[in-house]
Image (cartoon, rainbow, N blue to C red):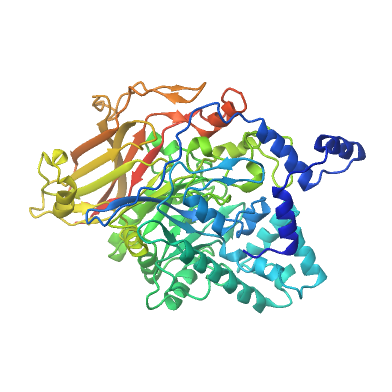
Amino acid sequence: MKYPLTAIVTGLALCLPIHADTKSAELHAKQKGQKLTIEQRLQLTREETTRQNENAFSRPKPEPRQTTTFNPNRNLYFGDTHVHTALSFDSYLSGNRLGLRDAYRFANGEPLTLPTGEVMQLSRPLDFVVMTDHAEGFGLFVTCSRKDLSDEQKTFCASFDRPNRKLYRSLRGEAERRPPIPPQALYADRPERSLEDARTTWQQVVDTAEEFNKPGQFTAFAGYEYSPPLPQKGKIHRNVIFRNSDTPNRAVSAFDAATVLDLWRSLEQECTGACDFLTIPHNLNKTWGLAYSGVTIDGDPYTTEDWALRGRNEPLAEIFQIKGNSECGYGVGASDEECNFELVLPICEGEQTIGCSGRTSFVREGLKIGLELNQKLGFNPLQTGFVGSTDTHSSNPGDTEEYDFRGGGGNHDSPATKRLGLSTANKTFDKGSPKGMVRNPGGLAAVWAPENTRDAIFDAMRNRETYATSGTRIQLRFFAGWDYPRNLLNKPDLISKAYQLGVPMGSVLNPGRHGDNRPEFLVWAVKDSQGTNLQRIQMVKAWLDNGKSREQVFDIACSDGLKPDPTTGRCPDNGAKVDLTDCSVSSDKGTPELKVHWRDPDFDPKQSAFYYVRVLENPSCRWSTYDALRLGKTPLDGPPATIQERAWSSPIWYTP
């Protein structure tokens, strides 16, 4: 990665020990009414890090990668399709100096150390990854490394190593213009340079993915994030992923494509021959309702052709990440309590749309709208499968274990004192606030594919044979059919028969031969080998009743020999507990495996519907509790002390 000279010098300073008496410097600066230097603040932060007790709880030892051979019944691969490195300007502004190669090495199991001194490492390497740095920042560091810059441009480039909120707001303000424009301080005199240097950065992204791609062992996709902002930190972003290294010669950004419709059109025009792409929307919870509203960022309604364009290019949605849960919102179309899991924004009330999450900000509601559109258009453009990812800005893809969460935002939320809003040091970019405690380590993308290659995993994503987790590595199978044998769950050929007689997650189930029989669903969930036991399996169903969407959530399998309550339909509490003094969990509650063969008791063959599975683990410690233990404190008031990790299968649709 090419950085401006000032970035290289300061980046080195951030990684080297400061030998001066930092505390004396702090006192002297206060007496003189001066601010501490970045290096002095960082040293204070490192001192806070050394006071953390990383042995306050147990953790598993890192395991090596387990490679697989070709399997026609599919292997399970875990990855992260949403990762930012120091190549993203917001990541760089937050102090991250770990680049693309650092992130790839981390994904393959190597540890990384933040400038604050905190060490990050995966419990198990990832199987695949997509680095999705913001395309709007491509070319920035290339331009700043040029020797023919004006004094004003040199000052602008140097400002990235002295980050502050004013700079960030200025850059965001320029990007919020319609249409967005590149930073005028850098490109006003030569706008063509932004395109030229952005292409250089994109080629670096493609080449580095090619360098780390190891068919059969580890898959690296070329990709980026398309990031037009909304007011008040809203997002209407997409991750763009390419099948192989045959890509367009540029990354189409918000400076080139004012709306996502323009993005898709440009990509379809430029991605030809062996080139293939797909897009994944994320943070639907923060789109201010635009995710499924049927209008563009500029308020223009989608046409039938626009919906078809979306349906062709967007087979997946990111349902969970560091900035919250986009599955559903309790009270805006959804009625089950699990919709309250890791929400970062309040639910919209009345006509409010900005700063909150409304009905059209959640995936489940989007899937219902898809059923409605199918009646109107004759096709469903919103048949999207699920993935989870991190959206980390610390170059640590897949780092989703609660005990290893380091904030995901570079220096401005590291170490533990800062994440919990207790820090007094390193206030350069972000003072640290309890508001940050609503975030979480993010999720993982799980893919069922015959082998670990670009083509196989890309095809699985295109076919939606994927699922999302909240960071755990639950193994989940989900099939639907009409004629599954009753004892199939206990047969050694379960999976081959499930494919032969039905369809997997992400598919459309065609009507049965007799027209009035009920579909059968097979669900098989196995706990994360390093995680907590499973507690229950839920089936989420939504359907159209006289043109209006309805939904119901069933608990279809309970652990510990329990049965769903006949009145509530919910599994009783199995009594699993968490010891908040060391985060140990009940090993005698829950189960390592749950299987169920379920038939919809209220199926109507004339009604369009979709079904997806949600699997819940027993409670375990949330990251904020682990941080409290590091600091010798009890869990803080506000955030929950425990969570229930989970997995969400991609849906299966039924269309009459």
Task: Determine the residue positioned at 22% across, 48% down.
Answer: 479
Quadrant in which the C terminus appears: bottom left
Q: Nearer the viewer, residue 278 or 405?
A: 405
Task: Determine the residue positioned at 55% across, 42% down.
Answer: 120
Q: Quadrant of residue 462?
A: bottom left
Residue 289, position in %: x, y?
49, 53
Residue 545 visible, this angle:
no
Residue 493, position in %: x, y?
14, 46
| Image side of residue 112 versus residue 94, left or right | left
| Image side of residue 587 versus residue 433, left or right | left
Residue 236, position in %: x, y?
52, 58
Residue at the extreme right of the image, as rendered: 32
Residue at the extreme left of the image, as rendered: 514
Residue 387 visible, this angle:
yes
Task: Determine the residue positioned at 58% across, 41% down.
Answer: 119
Q: Nearer the viewer, residue 44 or 392?
A: 44
Q: Can you say whether 174 is above or below 51 in the image?
A: below
| Image side of residue 341 versus residue 631, left or right | left
| Image side of residue 542 versus residue 645, left or right | left
Quadrant in which the N terminus appears: bottom right
How many badges with numbers are in the image? 0
Q: Nearer the viewer, residue 210 or 256?
A: 210
Residue 162, position in %: x, y?
76, 54
Q: Can you say whether 25 is above or below 588 in the image?
A: below
